[in-house]
Image: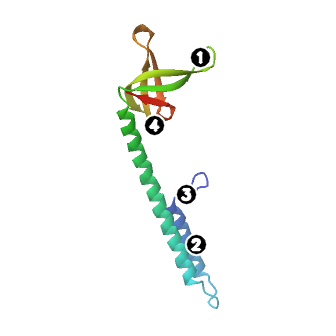
Amino acid sequence: MSTSGIASASNIQMDYMKLLVAQLQNQNPLEPLDNNEMASQLAQFSQLAQLESMSSSFAEVLVTVNRSYANSLLGKNVTFYSMDETTGVLEEKVGTVNSVFNDPVTGESLLGVTVGEGDDAEEYTLGLGAVLLVEN
């Protein structure tokens, strides 16, 4: 089993089964393993696998909800903070969401926001967490 990452519940359960078989093959006949304890441990592994599956399902739902929310912001004015490159001071900005896209690396929903109009317009890319206020 790899120690570099978190093992899935099924990998842990498989390792436990291998250990259990080895224990059964090498047990002392005068002191056998407790069946109730083995059954309890197997039930715990089953619960862990179900929780792992639920966590994965919730993560997928969250991605869908975030995408839907990001799409609902199209055409709306959003308020956010931006760091002024010359002074290093945070400035409050208000702009219009004109595009929604997903980061190809992280899968995060991002907003394309335009602040100002005409030649003075500035383009910003924001994560949903950067939005402070949404207005029509």
Query: Mark 1 or 3 closer to N-term?
Result: 3
Residue 112 on image: x %, y %: 42, 25
Q: Amino acid at mark 3?
A: Ala
Q: Residue at x 44, y 57 (%)?
A: 54
Which structural element holds mark 3?
loop
Which residue, given by chain and number where applicable, does mark 1 sit on? 85
- Quarter-of-image position of residue 50: bottom left
Residue 91 on image: x %, y %: 56, 20
Which residue, given by chain and number where applicable, does mark 2 sit on? 19
Q: Residue at x 64, y 88 (%)?
A: 31
Q: Residue at x 42, y 46 (%)?
A: 62
Query: Mark 2 or 3 closer to N-term?
Result: 3
Against 4, residue 121 (above or below) is: above
Residue 12 on image: x %, y %: 54, 64
Q: Amino acid at mark 1?
A: Glu
Against 28, residue 40 (above or below) is: above
Query: Mark 1 or 4 closer to N-term?
Result: 1
Which residue, given by chain and number where applicable, does mark 3 sit on? 7
- In this rendering, the label closer to the viewer, 1 or 4: 1
Q: Which image quarter is the N terminus in?
A: bottom right
Q: Residue furthest bottom?
A: 30
Query: Mark 4 or 3 closer to N-term?
Result: 3
Q: Which mark is residue 108?
A: 4
